[in-house]
Every structure is written in C-alpha cells, then in structure tokens.
Image (tube, helix red, strand yellow):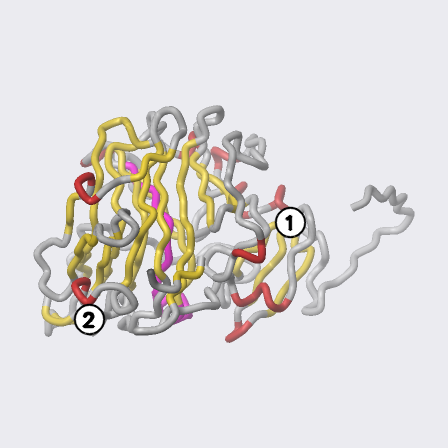
Amino acid sequence: MADVVYMPLLLVITILPLNPLLGDGRQLGGSKGIFKTIKGENGEVIDCVDIYKQPSFAHPLMLDHIIQLEPSFNTSKLRLKDVIVKESWQNYGECPRGSVPILRKQGTYPSFYANNKLAPLDDPSFQYQLAAVKHEKKGGMYGAHAKVNIWRPSVNQFDASLSKISILAGDGDDLKTIEVGWRVAPATGSSDPTTFIYWSDNKNKSAGCYNLDCPGFIKTGQTLAIGAKLDHISAYDGVQYDVDYEIRMDENTKNWWVTVNGSPQGYWPSKLFSGTFQNGDVVQWGGEAKIKVDTQYTTPTQMGSGHMADEGLKKACYMTDIKYINEDGKQIALTADGLDPLDGGHFRYKVSIDATIDERPFVYFGGPGGPL
C-alpha cells in the first residue's frame, strides 16, 4: 500500500463610540463585520467575518434564516494532528471564535462577490470533459463521500480542472446539482489547487455559483476558507496526499452539509432550492475539465495529475473510500461492481477502476489534454 497521508463573556458599557481599526484602516465590526484579516502567501487575504454578518445573508431567502451551527448527525472528526493537507493561510493565523474565514476576492472589497456569472453548460465557447464514475439510485442518495488525491495540473488561462464529488437530482429544467472537491482555475487568480463548492438549480437560471461567488452557502466552520490554496501536493512516483470530502443531507433540517477532513464547514439551506431537494438520484466521483474552445479545438489543460488513468497509483490522480449515504444516514461503501465509468469517449481524459488494493476500489482519472 502506498504512503497515503490522510470568550469569556465580557460586559462593556460604551459611553463614547469606539471604532477600532484593522491594520489596513477598516473598522473592526463595521457593516461588513470583519473582526480580523490574515495575509497569507501570494497575495491571499482571509477576512474573519462575524458569522451572523457573512455575505450569504444578502440572499433574499436568507433574511430571516437562523444559522444551524452544527449538523444533527455525528461527524467522525479527525484529530488535528492527523490532518496533513491544510490551507496555507493557516500558517499565518486563525480566526477568532464567532467568526468564519472568507477568502477575499482580489480587487472586490468591499463586495464579497464576483461580478462574473457562470458560463451556462450550453455555452458554445466552452466544452466540459468528464472522466468519472457514477452510482445511480433514484431518490436514494442522501450524501456522498471520498478521499480525493491532490495534484497541481497545468491549466490554460481561461480553463478549469476539477476533481470532485457531485450529487444530482432531477433532470432537464428540474436538475439540481451540488458539488465539493478541489479545482485549479487560473482565472480566479491562482494556479494552485483549492477546495471548491458548487451549486445550481436549473429551474432558476440565475441561481448557483462556485464557492461564495453568490449568496446561498452558509459558512460555519473555522478551519477552511473556501477557495484558498491547499498546502500539500502529491508528487509523481512520490508521497501522495489526499483530502476527505463529504456532502450529507441533515435529516432534521434538510440542509445539505459540506464536511472537509471530518470537520463540518457549512451548508446549503434547503430553502435555497426550488421545489423539494431532500435526496439525490445520481452521485458522480471523478474529474472534469472546463475548456474554452479556440479555433484550434485543442487544449493543454490537464486533468487530475496530468497523466492517464491507466498509469495507476502514485502517477494518476485517484479517489478512494468511495461511499454514498442512504436514507438511514449510513455510509454505504461501494465496490467496483457498483460504479459505472463515465469518460465521454475523449481519448485524452480517461477513467479506470482498480479493486485490487485492500479490497476497495481506487478510481483513477485524468489525462494531459490535447485535441478536442
């Protein structure tokens, strides 16, 4: 087996208004509720925002929302010393209790949101190439889990390369999607892998986005700033690193929770979606390349490690510990027989399943890019 590395209460009587400033001149606890700012590597800035003033409350459906601070289900929290892959900003500080870390968009302060919208899936200027596996159980998927191998693929300026878990419900105009994983997307300002989340609801064409680029996802965890740089990368024929990702529906609140390395990070409220979204029909595990098509109809954008799936362990990107969550809230481990390959027939991005290691499937996926 390869080396896989897994206040006290203070009463203050204010006689005169006090407006303490942060280092860059902004008010502490002002209208944006920023308690602290942490400057990381390569220009990364993390704002520690009052959990009750986080940007998702700008959504009209969230005006009267009461935050669910913890999921009602048990989480197998990893001890801190067991969590090898973290975000690099954590080496420079931590957010105080009562706040959540939010990655500042470059050049967008005081707004937390990007102005650009997602390109629709039918946008002819983009192609979406998939190399993944799926498990289908209509109305029976209440969450999904995997350990996801971390790499730094080479990605063209306007492209994106993702390694992710996706839960889908419905189809066509009624399709709803939620995702978690890591991605490299240079257009966001970084060519490093970062944890991402994504949601969409086809009934409301303007609903959905990556990370916190639009209101909706409620952040609760203090250990992760969604979209910030991960600090460990796997090496070809060397040490491998992975991150434990999970999405799970809370049976009591019907909110969809995201857990990273055993620590709950926040949730999509159930009322965010049109109609009813209390379970999924299909789960996908694997890679996706979002490619801006030029006149050459070719791309240098890599998926996964940039190497083909059939190269195997320590060379190709993998997912393992692949499970879905059933109606009883139990994790159901999947065997190779329960996984159907999805690679779209593209000969430069492939997926393969290896069930010979510890009797659990390793799903390898990716490739170097090339002609489309």
**Left or right: where does residue 264 sit relative to residue 130?**
right
Q: Do the residues labelled 1 and 2 touch (CB within 8 Å)?
A: no
Identify the residue at horizontal 37%, vertical 33% (top origin).
273
- Residue 276 in the image, given as x and y percentages of width and height: 34, 25
Q: Please give left or right for residue 56 compared with residue 233 in the image.
A: right
Q: Point out residue 284 in the picture as x, y percentages from the top left corner.
A: 25, 45
Please, is residue 369 above or below residue 123 in the view? below
| Residue 345 location (% of width, % of height) | 8, 56
Q: What stretch is highlighted in magenta?
A: 176-192
Residue sitting at x 22%, y 70%: 307
Q: Quadrant of residue 348?
A: bottom left
| Circle 2 Cα neighbour tier, 10 Å, few/some/many (<14 / 14–19 / ≥20) | many
Q: How far apart are marks 1 and 2 (CA)?
A: 41 Å
Does 102 appear above or below 292? above
Specify whether 104 is left or right of 20: left
Image quadrant occupied by the C terminus: bottom left
Is tag 1's residue or tag 2's residue first in the polypeptide sequence? 1
Around disc 1, counting alpha carbons within 10 Å, would you say few (fewer than 14), some (14 to 19), or many (20 or more)? many
Q: In which quarter of the image is the N terminus?
A: bottom left
Residue marked by disc 2:
368
SS for dot 2: loop
Is residue 328 visible in this depiction of the protein? yes
* SS state under label 1: strand
Question: Which amino acid, mark 1?
Answer: Ser
The numbered disc on residue 99 is 1
Badge 2 amino acid: Pro
